[in-house]
Amino acid sequence: MGYRKARFIWAGIGIGWTLLVCLLIQIFLFLKGWDAPQETLWGFLLILFMGQSIVEYVGGYALPNKHGQSLLNNPGQWMGQYLRGLLIYLIYYVFNGYMLMLMAQTLGLGGAIGWFVIQMLILMGFRQYLARGIHPFKTRFETNRGRPIFYMETEDRGFTGGISGIPGQESIIFPAYWEKKFSSEVSDALLAMRHGVLNTGGHGKGFFLIILLHTALISLAMWVIPEPVGSLEWLIGSVSLYTLLMAFASLGVLPSLNRRGVIEMDRWLYYKKVDADILRKAITESRRLQNDISATGSPTSGVALLVHAAPKGHERFTSLQSQRPIKGMWYVFSDWAFLSWAGLSLMNRMFPGALGTPSRWIFLPGE
């Protein structure tokens, strides 16, 4: 079995396990009349995290080493990075969970939902700093075409960077490794792509859509779970239901918007007179690297529908000179997964591109 297929299968196991436990929590709370023993609920969460940790070990260390895709020499190195990331993850989740309960107790559902929205804005605004807390990136700052660029260096060759900051205040996060891996013309083209998604508005549109979708899902989850609002039972019930709703909302539409956003970015660069041969070379080489290291690519079936979706290379090539209008939302799936931290989603570490790899928890691999 190839590396990419194995990683998708283990991600599917992780996602399936997460959704199964969330479903069992919902059934248990329903049968107990929403007044369940807290010890049992904590037990469900412990079982969930134990299962996820096993899957993350396989996806983050065992599989990459078996297929020669890891630069970590022993499980201790991986465990050190994983525990560092998990510690920051749990600290944020405990703090945010406490604040959601406090806001619900003092201001009702409106207060909890308002806090949730504020958290999404804060997370996006401080995204790169959270990434640097979770993983020991080395960072170099420059400006390019009037925009702040943070070149982030890590031993993880599957890190692809992204965009940090709310619309109007964005910074480009660019993998320092790409400057060494690719020729200067290819590296410049890949950086120009990041400028393109901001200039076309593809990232900003996706960000506002995600805010609306997440707010709708968390509002529904908090409203469905009955009183006592603000209790631990209410929080765990809301979070598990939110995770289930998020899984179904991830199917189809968001990956499609992401694919269209990538094509829109390519076409913008083409009509801005970026050399077509260099553009094709940049697409081919970056796609090959991601397929080899991150095992990310264009999903075709099953669990792949839940993860970040990139258009196939030939689709990007043939669309360059097309006159047919296309609008999309670049990187929307990565932002979707990351901003679910605000609602304490239990699924966001299970996607294939990020599985067991803290360096990609904040910036899920993308084009």
Image: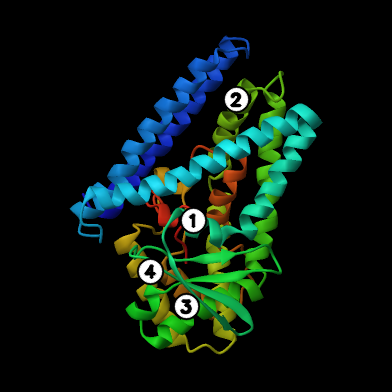
Tell which tag, 4 or 1, sits nearer the viewer. 1
Q: CA distance from mark 2 to mark 3?
A: 43 Å
Counting other residues with Cα less than 10 Å from the Cα at mark 3, is it few (<14), some (14-19), or many (20 or more)? many
Q: Which residue is mark 3?
A: 190
Query: Which amino acid type is marked by label 2?
Result: Gly
Q: How is the image coloured?
A: rainbow
**Mark positioned earlier in the residue sequence (3 or 1):** 1
Frontmost residue, 315 versus 21: 21
Q: Residue 196, relative to residue 7: is it above or below?
A: below
Mark 2 and mark 4 residues within 8 Å of each other at the beta carbon: no
In the picture, the disc for residue 287 is 4
Q: Is residue 270 left or right of residue 317?
A: right
Q: CA distance from mark 3 to mark 4?
A: 11 Å
**Mark positioned earlier in the residue sequence (4 or 1):** 1
Counting other residues with Cα less than 10 Å from the Cα at mark 2, is it few (<14), some (14-19), or many (20 or more)? many
Q: Which residue is mark 1?
A: 133
